[in-house]
Amino acid sequence: MNVSMWLVVILQASKENVLSQIINGKTQLKYSGGNAFALIIDGKSLAYALDDDIKHIFLELAVSCASVICCRSSPKQKALVSFKLILES
């Protein structure tokens, strides 16, 4: 992660809040003027973000970021994100 990166942090335990933060993150990216972003998401939020009805928009955000950090998540969750990001890119 670069010191000049902007952060998108998703740390909420409800599905609605996670979706809202993902949408806000995509909006920030859209109007950032080409600045690099790092996405930080915790395990509970990641579980919601990987639900079938949200995962596409989450993966769009993740692929657009220079770095994705999954904290407090299981190795299985991290592997799933990595695998899906590779398929999307």
Image (cartoon, rainbow, N blue to C red):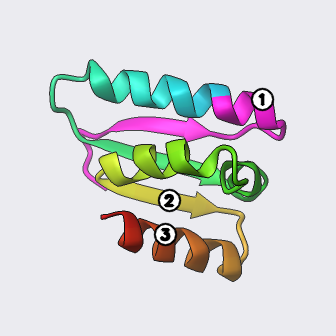
30 within the magenta span:
no
Of marks 1 and 2, which one's residue comes earlier in the chain?
Answer: 1
Q: Secondary structure at mark 2?
A: strand
17 within the magenta span:
yes
Check whether the beta carbons of the residues at disc 1 and disc 2 lie within 8 A of each other.
no
Residue sitting at 69 percent across and 40 percent down? Answer: 11
Residue sitting at 29 percent across and 53 percent down? Answer: 66
Given the image, on which type of amino acid does mark 2 rest?
Answer: Ile
Percent across and percent down for residue 77 are: 67, 72
Q: Which mark is residue 84?
A: 3
The residue where tag 1 is placed is: 16
3D distance between C-alphas at marks 3 and 1 = 22 Å
Q: Which residues are magenta?
A: 1-19
Q: Secondary structure at mark 3?
A: helix
In the image, is residue 8 above or below residue 32?
below
In the image, is residue 14 above or below residue 43?
above
Q: Which of labels 1 and 2 is toward the front?
A: 1
In the image, is residue 70 above or below residue 38?
below
Q: Secondary structure at mark 1?
A: helix
**63 left or right, relative to 46:** left
The residue where tag 2 is placed is: 69
Q: Quadrant of the N terminus?
A: bottom left
Check whether the beta carbons of the residues at disc 3 and disc 1 lie within 8 A of each other.
no
3D distance between C-alphas at marks 2 and 3 = 14 Å
Of marks 3 and 1, which one's residue comes earlier in the chain?
Answer: 1
Q: Quadrant of the C terminus?
A: bottom left
Given the image, on which type of amino acid does mark 1 rest?
Answer: Glu
